[in-house]
Image (cartoon, grey):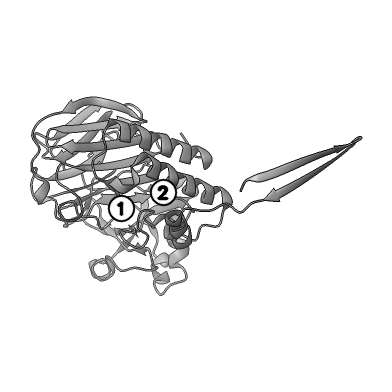
């Protein structure tokens, strides 16, 4: 899995912001606490025609998730 | 659209006439078709028949939300068939939408239903269903849909295949958890509580696992909306992501054995009509 690393301020500002009628930005932190934006190809197409297209210029980086906290299993 | 055919035999000449009769569409189906901008005739027919079947089986009225996931785009997949415009889905980044269904990336993607169990559902009468087209065994914690409250006392969720095990919590994870072995996560899954002492789960119309008869507790702690593709962690974040393509999802009142079987029959026919059955 690959995603784009953004600075914490961008993640904070854009978290939950809709870029079209149905889809909003969601950022996750990787194992190193970097904020990642992980997009599908459709997301990229949809974002490319919005004011947020600048995000697509960011390079793709490998994403390594944090160890998943265990639910009560 | 039905075709009436006249065959007129005159010597060796065969003349065929076809008269297309406009078919009436159920008003609720039409409302969805309009809201989801569905134009494909096969999809329209499939949705209409699904609505007719669910109404005929008495399942329609027991659903708060039905997401048939038809149309191939986020905007069409978002629409709630039961009440278009209410409890429509909103999607985070990370989903892939196709004519076969919608697939979360298993890392960050989730969809919000806006359905809050303690507000919109009824204690001791709840179900959720998920038609999965993906067979994956996720070894880390993962839930295909659900919400948890602030403690283990309040969970409402379903995980189709977590370490080769099916999980359903309704509602206390200690005493109200149903688990059973499952080595293939494809198919139509329903988990349903019909009384305070009856929690059952079904796969393709057949009960899986035993009936959980422990007294239920914890429903009132479910005060945030249900997510799909992950679990809503007490409204703090989404966590325990999954990656299975969903092709119909529902939430609503508890369904008994007959209703669950009939629901499965209707959904399997729906998927077959759309050529995406697994």
User: Is B193 or B173 nearer to us in this picture?
Assistant: B193
Q: Residue at label 2?
A: B68
Direction from residue B114 to residue B16 in the image, left or right: right
Q: Position of residue B110 (x, y in %)?
A: 30, 53
Q: Residue at coordinates 43% horizontally, 42% vertically from top-left?
A: B53
Q: Secondary structure at mark 2?
A: loop
Q: Position of residue B141 (x, y in %)?
A: 22, 39
- Same chain letter for marks 1 and 2: yes
User: Is B258 or B158 nearer to us in this picture?
Assistant: B258
Q: Which mark is residue B110?
A: 1
Say if B80 sits above or below B133 in the image: below
Q: Mark 1 and mark 2: span between their CA atoms?
A: 17 Å
Residue B128 in which image quadrant? top left
Which quadrant is the C terminus of chain A positioned in? Answer: top left
**Label 2: few (<14), some or many (≥20) within 10 Å?**
many
Say if B142 sits above or below B261 in the image: below
Q: Residue furthest right?
A: B11
Q: Position of residue B247 (x, y in %)?
A: 41, 44
Residue B179 in which image quadrant? top left
Q: Which mark is residue A45?
A: none
Residue A43 in which image quadrant? bottom left
User: Is B3 or B86 nearer to us in this picture?
Assistant: B3
Q: Position of residue B176 (x, y in %)?
A: 12, 35
**Label 1: few (<14), some or many (≥20) within 10 Å?**
many
Which chain is mark 1 on?
B
Q: Residue at coordinates 20% horizontally, 37% vertically from top-left?
A: B193
Q: Residue at coordinates 23% horizontally, 40% vertically from top-left?
A: B254
Q: Residue furthest bottom?
A: A51
| Any part of residue B220 in sight | yes
């Amino acid at each position: 899995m690959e995603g784009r690393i953004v600075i914490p301020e961008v993640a904070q500002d854009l978290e939950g912001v809709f870029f079209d009628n149905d889809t909003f930005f969601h950022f996750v932190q990787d194992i190193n606490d970097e904020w990642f934006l992980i997009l599908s190809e459709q997301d990229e197409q949809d974002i490319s025609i919005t004011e947020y297209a600048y995000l697509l210029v960011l390079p793709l980086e490998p994403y390594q998730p944090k160890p998943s906290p265990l639910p009560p299993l | 659209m039905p075709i009436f055919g006249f065959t007129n035999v005159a010597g060796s000449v065969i003349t065929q006439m076809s008269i297309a009769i406009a078919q009436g569409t159920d008003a609720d189906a039409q409302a969805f078709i309009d809201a989801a901008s569905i134009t494909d005739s096969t999809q329209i027919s499939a949705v209409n028949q699904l609505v007719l079947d669910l109404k005929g089986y008495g399942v329609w009225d027991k659903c708060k939300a039905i997401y048939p996931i038809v149309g191939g785009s986020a905007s069409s997949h978002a629409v709630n068939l039961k009440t278009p415009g209410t409890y429509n889905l909103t999607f985070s980044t990370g989903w892939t939408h196709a004519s076969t269904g919608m697939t979360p990336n298993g890392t960050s993607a989730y969809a919000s239903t806006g359905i809050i169990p303690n507000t919109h559902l009824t204690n001791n009468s709840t179900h959720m269903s998920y038609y999965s087209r993906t067979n994956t065994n996720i070894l880390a914690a993962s839930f295909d849909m659900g919400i948890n409250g602030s403690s283990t006392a309040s969970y409402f969720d379903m995980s189709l295949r977590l370490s080769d095990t099916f999980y359903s919590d309704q509602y206390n994870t200690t005493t109200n958890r149903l688990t059973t072995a499952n080595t293939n996560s494809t198919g139509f899954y329903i988990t349903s509580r019909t009384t305070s002492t009856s929690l059952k789960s079904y796969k393709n119309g057949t009960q899986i696992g035993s009936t959980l008869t422990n007294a239920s507790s914890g429903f009132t702690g479910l005060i945030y909306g249900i997510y799909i593709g992950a679990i809503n962690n007490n409204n703090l974040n989404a966590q325990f992501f999954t990656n299975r393509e969903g092709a119909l999802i529902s939430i609503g009142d508890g369904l008994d054995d007959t209703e669950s079987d009939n629901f499965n029959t209707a959904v399997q026919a729906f998927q077959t009509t759309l050529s995406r059955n697994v």
